[in-house]
């Protein structure tokens, strides 16, 4: 009688357990589909959100340390390179906000009188709140 | 419409190959033939050595999921005629080890599925004399969408996160956990939260959204995960603010 092979917890290649093929993901998997590329861009947008937080803290520090420092900060901000970084950051932060607002109906299931509130209404209320807050901020800045 | 169509089928025979190779077959293409019909024609008429899984032919069993021209699809619900002149390129589902040809190894999913207890958990069963557990249509509606999952694994094949982080519990297992969490008869939400709220659970998902796009049963696993993130976050806040009320 032949001896049966001993099976380990994770067998590799035995007579009764053929070798599996384990395809590897390419490093550039995210370039092959628009859905994956847009996902990576959305993930990348977090870096620019962080940049705006840093920029805001630098502004607060400049305001806090006197008029000369504030003027210096404004001059630095007006440099073409910084302007460009902020424009790119604005585009990415907008992408970040839009994708979050579009996500809201997925996460929030609101029921009114037994009926599920349509996704468009939930996303729309987020956009409306965004517009109202933006208008408020614009009024605050421009009216002053 | 052409009478025949070319099918390029991935082959992996572990005893003779170290990687996928492709073989081309010409199969009839009547308007009512699905990709699975083409595969069965190959198996019966052209090459009996081809291996693939199938069973019901009607989008219920979830066995015949494969990659068709780069997209995860149920081959019983994908018409050959939709690929025009062809060719139709068939590969095994991505993100899973390949056992042979178009057959993938799914033990990882089965273990993950069991870990979220996809059944009704009761603290105590009521006696038979008290009758069945009744539900209103609204209570049924709360989870019905998630109960449509057929474990076809197209969502896992579409999920790059599962490909990159094999520990990720994955879309279908989370959607099925939600199916029971939202069931009015179930009392196992707290037990499932231990598994789901870990990093490899819901927080592993970065909402690519492809799982929902490829789902043939409109289960919306991405939605299930995002909903559960909200639930888990609220539970954490609740446990922090009112420690006496948690669990």
Image (spheres, coloured by chain):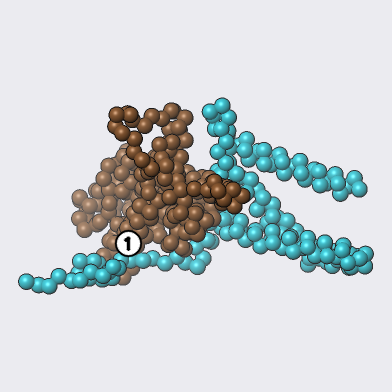
The answer to whether one can see residue B52 in this image is yes
Q: Residue at x 32, y 58 (%)?
A: B107
Quickly name the residue at label 1: B98
In this view of the protein, which residue sits in the foreground, B75 or B246?
A: B246
Is residue B244 shown left or right of residue B200?
right
- Outermost right residue: A67
Q: Which chain is cyan?
A: A
The answer to whether one can see residue B214 in this image is no
In this view of the protein, which residue sits in the foreground, A45 or B231?
A: B231
Q: Is residue B11 above or below residue B61?
A: below
Q: Which chain is brown?
A: B
Relative image position of residue B139 (x, y in whole percent): 45, 32
- Outermost front residue: B244
SS of the residue under disc 1 = strand
In this view of the protein, which residue sits in the foreground, A124 or B55?
A: A124
Q: Residue at x 12, y 72 (%)?
A: A3
């Amino acid at each position: 009688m032949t001896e049966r092979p001993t099976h380990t917890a994770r067998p590799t290649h035995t007579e009764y357990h053929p070798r599996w093929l384990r395809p590897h993901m390419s490093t550039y998997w995210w370039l092959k589909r628009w859905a994956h590329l847009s996902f990576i861009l959305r993930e990348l947008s977090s870096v620019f959100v962080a940049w705006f937080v840093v920029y805001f803290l630098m502004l607060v520090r400049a305001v806090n340390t006197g008029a000369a420092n504030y003027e210096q900060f404004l001059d630095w901000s007006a440099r073409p390179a910084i302007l460009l970084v902020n424009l790119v950051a604005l585009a990415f932060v907008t992408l970040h906000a839009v994708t979050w607002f579009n996500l809201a109906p997925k996460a929030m299931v609101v029921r009114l009188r037994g009926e599920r509130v349509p996704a468009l209404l939930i996303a729309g209320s987020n956009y409306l709140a965004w517009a109202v807050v933006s208008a408020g901020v614009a009024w605050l800045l421009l009216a002053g | 419409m052409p009478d025949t169509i070319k099918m390029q089928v991935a082959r992996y025979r572990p005893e003779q190959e170290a990687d996928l190779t492709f073989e081309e077959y010409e199969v009839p293409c009547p308007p009512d033939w699905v990709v699975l019909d083409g595969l069965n024609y190959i198996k019966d008429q052209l090459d009996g050595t081809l291996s693939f899984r199938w069973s019901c032919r009607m989008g219920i069993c979830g066995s015949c999921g494969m990659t068709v021209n780069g997209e995860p699809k149920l081959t019983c619900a994908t018409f050959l005629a939709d690929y025009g002149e062809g060719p139709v390129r068939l590969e095994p589902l991505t993100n899973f080890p390949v056992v042979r040809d178009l057959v993938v190894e799914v033990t990882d999913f089965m273990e993950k599925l069991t870990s979220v207890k996809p059944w009704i958990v009761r603290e105590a069963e009521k006696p038979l004399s008290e009758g069945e557990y009744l539900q209103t249509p609204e209570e049924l509606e709360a989870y019905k969408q998630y109960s449509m999952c057929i474990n076809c694994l197209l969502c896992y094949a579409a999920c790059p996160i599962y490909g990159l982080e094999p520990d990720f519990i994955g879309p279908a297992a989370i959607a099925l956990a939600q199916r029971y969490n939202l069931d009015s008869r179930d009392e196992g939400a707290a037990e499932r939260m231990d598994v789901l709220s870990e990093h490899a659970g819901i927080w592993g998902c970065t909402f690519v959204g492809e799982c929902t796009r490829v789902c043939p049963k409109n289960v919306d696993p991405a939605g299930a995960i995002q909903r559960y993130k909200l639930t888990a976050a609220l539970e954490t806040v609740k446990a922090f603010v009112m420690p006496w009320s948690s669990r």
